[in-house]
Image: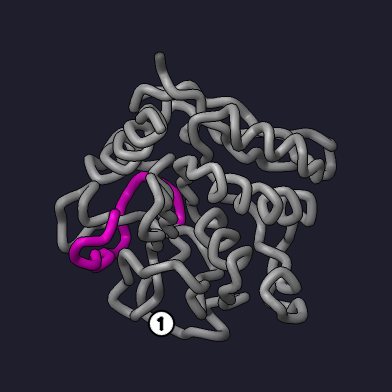
Amino acid sequence: MKPVIGIAPLYDSGKESYWMLPGYMKGLEAAGGIPVMLPLTGEQETLRQLAAQLDGFVLTGGPDVEPPVYGEEKKDTCGETCVMRDEMEQLLLPEILKADKPVLGICRGIQIMNAALGGTLYQDIPTEYPTETEHHQQPPYDRSVHEVIVEKDSLLWKITGKKTISVNSCHHQAIRDLAPGLEAAARSADGLVESVYMKGKRFFLGVQWHPEFSYITSQDSRAIFAGFVQACGMEL
């Protein structure tokens, strides 16, 4: 049977509606998974049951993480946030870890992974970490704009088999201090953490770039989805 994978939705406060970029679902489907949208709920028992019943989880891109999540006050340079997503993902992630279910974090996803586990973020790269590396590209988003250097023997190394990967990039926040238990799997040339993983778990990977935009054109993006879906399909 194909693994069933829960995806965190985006929330449109103006329309009071959940929505989803199709690339997340199509990328997972192409890799052999069945994607379903998660509810934005703070009910712990509901999230515990989801962690038990689903085969894996994707924490998607979206608005900025609320700075109080990582112990800071919100600066003017911080963008739009979504408290409902912050609260749900902070409750869900420990349940995922306890159940040892595979989890893939993308863009905001890697940031909430780090913040929820005790790390910190740069609220705004241009003002807090000035760099010549392009981190916020213009469309089309399936094209690569910089490379990341992959850590040898990391989960990303094992998935791609490469020392460097060319990636797209569309973010203005990034990991500052790594959370306890997380390891850097890749960095950009300017030193920013671009990917994290957790040793001793079936599959725990965060990437700062967007494989949901580039899985059609990038073998590395397809490999990330394939490795994740394969882990979701493994018997415990």
Q: Residue at x 57, y 32 (%)?
A: 6
x and y percent of residue 34 in the render? 48, 21
Q: Residue at x 24, y 67 (%)?
A: 151
Q: Quadrant of residue 15?
A: top right
Q: Which residues are magenta?
A: 138-155
Q: Is residue 108 above or below residue 16?
A: below
Location of the N terminus by quadrant is top left
Count residues near mark 1 (Cα–Cα under 10 Å), then give few for <14, some for 14-19, many for 20+. Answer: some
Q: Residue at x 40, y 62 (%)?
A: 196
45 or 161, nearer to the observer: 45
Q: Residue furthest top?
A: 1
Residue 27 visible in the picture: no
Check residue 148 for magenta coloring. yes
x and y percent of residue 35 in the render? 52, 26
Q: Dominant secondary structure of the magenta stretch?
A: loop
Q: Is residue 224 above or below residue 168?
A: above
Which colour style is shown?
Answer: one colour
Figure disc tally: 1
209 or 120, nearer to the observer: 120
Q: Residue at x 48, y 51 (%)?
A: 106
Mark 1, secondary structure of its residue: loop
217 or 115, nearer to the observer: 115
Relative horizontal placement of residue 190, taking residue 116 as reference (left or right):
left
Q: Which residue has dot 1 on it? A: 131
Residue 135 visible in the picture: yes
Q: Residue furthest front?
A: 236
Relative horizontal placement of residue 41, taking residue 185 as reference (left or right):
right
Residue type marked 1? Thr
x and y percent of residue 165 in the render? 23, 57
Check residue 146 for magenta coloring. yes
x and y percent of residue 30 in the render? 35, 24
